[in-house]
Image (cartoon, helix red, strand yellow):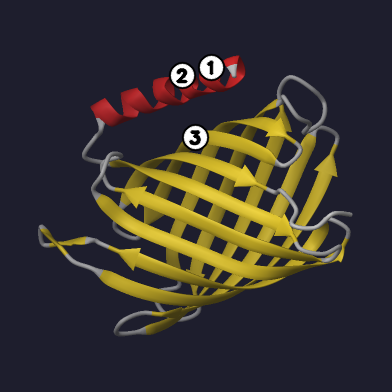
Amino acid sequence: MKILRSFALIIFALGTPFYYAQKNDVGAWYMYFGNNKISNKLNFHNEIQYRNFDGIGDLEQLLVRTGIGYDLTENNNNVLLGYGFVLSQPYVNGEKKQNIEHRVFQQFITKQKFGRLNLQHRYRLEERFLEDDFRVRFRYFLGLNIPLNGKEMLPKTFYASVSNEIFLHLDSPVFDRNRVYGALGYIINKNMRIEAGYMNQIQENKNRGQIQIGFYNNIPFTKK
């Protein structure tokens, strides 16, 4: 509990300067990710992301994603078919609007390890059913985790996390956005970890920062 309290203080210390210095420009994302085994090969993916414009209560987007994945090799090379529900509340000419989007997506994740470096590549294709449009988008995510107080990503380990993700449309305009992320994480036990960091999102006409706090749950639904 002392470690968790210390981690919470770090989150607060990192977030406060951003909030007060740029509270009109920096939002906050609160995220839950579940990746739970339902058999030796199958996993159930589930996530909820609550995104705010100002970090407190001005909803920007609520995203719920779920899917079923299959390990091509043990704990690696995973293919997944999923569905996402997205509720967005953007400001248009100063007035808040509401949009609903349904997504079907397919993805492939592969992991690599080089000494203390833990790499993850994710390739995702999304079919986006918007209220007045249909679009197909490709995403490539490259993430790196490095343990800080040990050589392996084991329980009670702090780690640094950095990543980059690019979004590309299959029609014009091709470039959608790019996200650069850096964070500090803590592994609670073999099935749970927490992470807090800062993400900068670049779009064609916008460049905006987000404080992010995430909880990761990998508790299996079945016994080995």
| Mark toward the viewer: 3 or 2 | 2
Distance from the alpha carbon under mark 2 to that under mark 1 = 5 Å
Q: Residues within 10 Å of mark 1 (few under 14, many from 20)?
A: few
The residue lying at 36 percent from left, 50 percent from top is: 51
- Disc 2 and disc 1 in contact, CB within 8 angstroms: yes
* 19 left or right of 102 in image: left
Q: Nearer the viewer, residue 39 or 77?
A: 39
**Residue underneath mark 2:** 9
**Mark before the other along the chain sequence, 3 or 2:** 2
**Along the horizontal axis of the image, is 106 left or right of 172?**
right
Disc 1, SS: helix
Q: Earlier in the sequence, mark 1 or mark 3?
A: 1
Look at the picture and state if 205 lies above or below 219: below
User: Where does the N terminus fall, quadrant-wise?
Assistant: top right
Q: Could you say where residue 25 lies in the image, as x and y percent from the top left?
A: 26, 41
Q: Quadrant of residue 72?
A: bottom right
- Label 1 sits on what residue type? Ser
User: Dot 2, how many residues are within 10 Å of its Cα: few (below 14), some (14-19), or many (20+)?
Assistant: few
Identify the secondary structure beneath mark 2: helix
Q: What residue would you read off at disc 3?
A: 197
Q: Position of residue 39 (x, y in %)?
A: 82, 64
Residue at image coords 58%, 14%: 2
**Residue at x 62%, y 53% (from the top left corner):** 34
Q: Nearer the viewer, mark 1 or mark 3?
A: 1
Q: CA distance from mark 3 to mark 2?
A: 13 Å
Q: Which part of the image, by quadrant, shows the C terminus?
A: bottom right
Query: What residue is at 67 percent from the left and 55 percent from the top?
Result: 35
The x and y percentages for residue 12 are 40, 23
Which residue matches tag 1? 6
Res 108 → quadrant: bottom right
